[in-house]
Image (cartoon, rainbow, N blue to C red):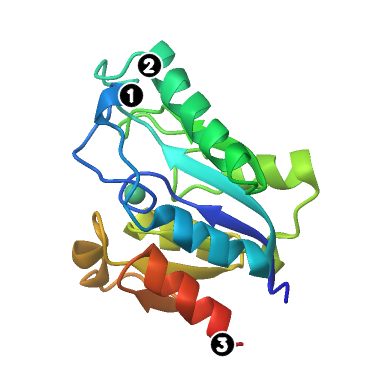
C-alpha cells in the first residue's frame, strides 16, 4: 500500500557508512541491509529521492568529478534493483556561507518537488542528522531519525522532534511496512 508520495533519503550515515567526507568511490559502502530496506520501502512509496549535503566540495576535500562518480554508482544501484530513484540532489555549500539549499534549508526539497511534481506534505524524510529532521519540518512532512551515522548524537538534541526514531534503515523499513 502506498503511504508516501516520495521517500526522501539522506545519503551518508543513512544509506551508507559515513567515515566523513567520502572523496572516492573506493570509500563508499552501502550498509549491508540497505538493499533489503529499500526493497521494503519501495512498496509504500511512489519514488525515492536522495537529498545530501556535501560541503566537502566547498572545503576542498572532495573533487566534483569524484562526487559524480559516486552518484553514478548510486543511480546504477537503484536502477539495477528496480528502485525508482528520481534523483540525487546535493548541496556543496560551505557551512559558513549557506544558501537555502543546504539542509536544514528546504531548497533542494522544493526543487525536487517542482522537477517531479512531488507532494511534500505526503512525503517522508529519513536521515541521521538534526538538519534532516529540521528540513522535513520546514517542508511540513514526516521525518524518521535513524540511529546510524550521526543519529545517536542527533537524538540527544533538544531542538528536534522527529515523527519516528528507528535503529537503522532496515528497522525503519520494517516498522513503516507494518504500521499506519
Ligand atoms: Mg547523514
- Who comes first in sequence, dot 2 or dot 3? 2
What is the x, y in percent for residue 89? 55, 36
Report which residue position mark 1 lands on: 25
Quadrant holding the C terminus: bottom right
Report which residue position mark 2 lands on: 66
Ligand 1 closer than 8 Å to the CB at disc 2?
no
Q: Residue at x 24, y 54 (%)?
A: 149
Please state if 165 lies on the left or on the right of 23 as rendered: right
Badge 3 element: loop
Cβ atoms at labels 3 and 1 below 8 Å apart: no
Badge 1 element: helix
Ligand 1 closer than 8 Å to the CB at disc 1?
no
| Up/down of 66 relative to 52, above or below | above
What is the x, y in percent for residue 91? 46, 32
Mark seen at residue 179: 3
C-alpha distance separating marks 3 and 1: 36 Å
Q: Residue at x 32, y 51 (%)?
A: 31
Q: Residue at x 24, y 43 (%)?
A: 18
Cβ atoms at labels 1 and 2 below 8 Å apart: yes
Amino acid at each position: 500500500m502506498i503511504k508516501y508520495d516520495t521517500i526522501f533519503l539522506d545519503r551518508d550515515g543513512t544509506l551508507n557508512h559515513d567515515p566523513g567526507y567520502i572523496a572516492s568511490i573506493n570509500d563508499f559502502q552501502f550498509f549491508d541491509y540497505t538493499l533489503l530496506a529499500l526493497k521494503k520501502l519501495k512498496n509504500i512509496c511512489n519514488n525515492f529521492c536522495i537529498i545530501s549535503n556535501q560541503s566537502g566540495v566547498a572545503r576542498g576535500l572532495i573533487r566534483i568529478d569524484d562526487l559524480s562518480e559516486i552518484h553514478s554508482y548510486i543511480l546504477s544501484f537503484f536502477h539495477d534493483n528496480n528502485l525508482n530513484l528520481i534523483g540525487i540532489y546535493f548541496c556543496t555549500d560551505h557551512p559558513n556561507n549557506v544558501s537555502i539549499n543546504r539542509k536544514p534549508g528546504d531548497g533542494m526539497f522544493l526543487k525536487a518537488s517542482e522537477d517531479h511534481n512531488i507532494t511534500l506534505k505526503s512525503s517522508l524524510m529519513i536521515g541521521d542528522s538534526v538538519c534532516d529532521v529540521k528540513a522535513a519540518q520546514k517542508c511540513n512532512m514526516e521525518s524518521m531519525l535513524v540511529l546510524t551515522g550521526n543519529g545517536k548524537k542527533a537524538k540527544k538534541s533538544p531542538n528536534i522532534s522527529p515523527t519516528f526514531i528507528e535503529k537503522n534503515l532496515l528497522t525503519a523499513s520494517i516498522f513503516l511496512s507494518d504500521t499506519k
